[in-house]
Image (cartoon, rainbow, N blue to C red):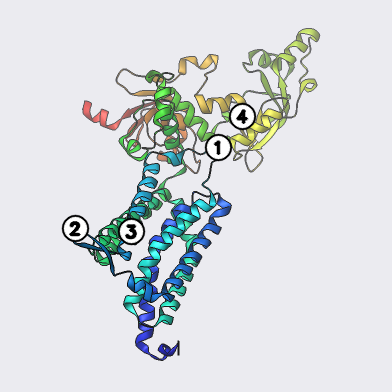
Amino acid sequence: MIFEWMSDPSAWVGLATLIVLEIVLGIDNLVFIAILAEKLPPEQRAKARIIGLVLALGMRLVLLASIAWVVTLTEPLFHIFDHPFSGRDLILLFGGVFLLFKGTMELHERMEGKQLHKEDNPVHAAFWMVIVQIVVLDAVFSLDSVITAVGMVKELSVMMVAVVIAVGIMLWASKPLMDFVNKHPTVVILCLGFLMMIGFSLVVEGFGFHIPKGYLYAAIGFSVLVEVINQSMRRNQEKLVTTTDLRYRTASAVLRMLGSKNSGSSDTQSSDKEDVLATQAFADEVFDEENGAYHSVLVQGVLGLSERPVKSVMTPRPELEWIDLDDEPEVLKERLMSMTHSRLIVARGELDNIEGIALTHKVLNNFIETGVIDFQKHLREPVIVHENAQVLMVMEQLRQAPLQMAIVLNEYGSIEGIATPIDILEAIAGEFPDEDELDAAAESLADGSLMLEGSTDIRHVSLLLGRDLVDESEQYSTLSGYLLFHLGRLPENGEAVEADGYRFEVITMEGHKIEKVHIVSIEQDESKD
């Protein structure tokens, strides 16, 4: 009976052991099939994978059915320098050389960076050419597998059952393995190293020098363990990267591609080694070192817009100029003549009772022609946005509005400020002071410290200091807000806060408003002492 062994416990142990060995022996074949199938168009890869494993199963079953012939392959065919060569030796030599050649070529392509060039219409390998390569591999690995089976058990049915189960398991696991290999380039390099090791061991065995499989599998197992630790470390690093870190690192990478030579911190240099050298060589002629810091401000400002709410770029309520329609005509005339902005906020009684927005020059022209100040005639409906609306969404609304000014409201319907295209541009390029603010611009002192306005955007302060002072929850958006956040109360003149490696001293207060702040590095301050 073919299945008499089913009543023998030792046969079941042999079957289980053989299945495990067949799977282990087939993993290298499966990995190489995954690498070869990657050269095909995506819609053909699954088909190639299935055909490859089915052919492997067919070859192994045919070889098992021809056990007598397989055994004769160990008989010497000829001698070279008194060393006998059998049919098995020749097949192992051919298979080993083939694996070394293919592994070396694949490794060379990846080291030269050819895989990095993505084309709109990439040229894929011919389907049947890949299948032929898979067949050659199947022949080599099938012979090794069958000889192992013949050496372990005696019953032909046990061998066939073990081979069918092992190939079935590999067929089921092949797609996840291929997906994993294709998503992790370092794993591909590791697998190519394994295949070259296997190819070398086949060549050596073909010359009669037996290398215990345990040594080979121990080396592979240790390498896999190291790669698992490496992949785990990368995943943990990705989890720890905040939105701000990612934005600054992306900006630094873009600047390096544009030719900026601003070195930044050593941490940034060590974590971003993927510079595009060809672009760097070209851009060195376009961008000079002198403008590197300004390029950094622009790029980081643009990248930051997608994450910022409009309240972080708006002109706040205390700085707004507005017209109260309940005022006397003489007061209105005086207010109109003193206005410095091109658009007027018109309200009645208080700012929250807004009537609309008017263009200053139209109201003035009408007053010159008629002698009457008529705001109602020139009122326009403003764009109304919530304080947490994204800047990019507000920018799109302003693009479609007749008057490019948005009124920013909080959750209670009170006006928090206004946003204009100039506010958005300032969020990218820095503050554009009004005529009456020119004397209050940011100042770099001789000792290397900074004198800044309290209303300076906290993101620009971060860029100037090289520190991340931004609060991801947007609890503050200015230098004044940063100081109030750390103090928890309104500061007094001369009061200082030490945070993030710097000393922030309040120089000037105007009522409840922080006007001037002196910033000095704590290390620099201690070195003076």
Q: Secondary structure at mark 3?
A: helix
In three-dimensional space, the C-alpha distance between marks 1 and 3, rounded to whole angstroms, equals 40 Å
Q: Are marks 2 and 4 in contact (CB under 8 Å)?
A: no
Give me the disc on residue 224.
3
Instruction: For mark 2, give the secondary structure.
Output: loop
Do labels 4 and 3 touch, CB within 8 Å? no
Image height check: is 423 above or below 137? above
Identify which residue is drawn at 62% across, 30% down: 418
What amino acid does circle 3 point to?
Answer: Val
Q: Which residue is mark 1?
A: 306
The quarter in which the N terminus is drawn is: bottom left
Find residue 436 and report its horizontal and vertical position in percent.
Answer: 53, 15
Q: CA distance from mark 2 to mark 1?
A: 74 Å
Give the Cα distance between marks 4 and 3.
55 Å
Reading the image, the residue beneath label 2 is 81
| Label 2 Cα crowd, 10 Å radius (few <14 / some 14-19 / many 20+) | few
Amino acid type of disc 1? Ser
**Hey, which residue is sitting farthest top in the picture?**
369
**Labels 4 and 3: the sequence-earlier one:** 3
Front of the two marks 2 and 4? 2
Circle number at residue 419: 4
Under circle 1, the secondary element is loop
Pointer 4 local density, CA inside 10 Å: few below 14, some 14–19, many at least 20: many
Element on which disc 4 rests: strand
Residue at 62 percent across and 16 percent down: it is: 340
Residue 492, image quadrant? top left
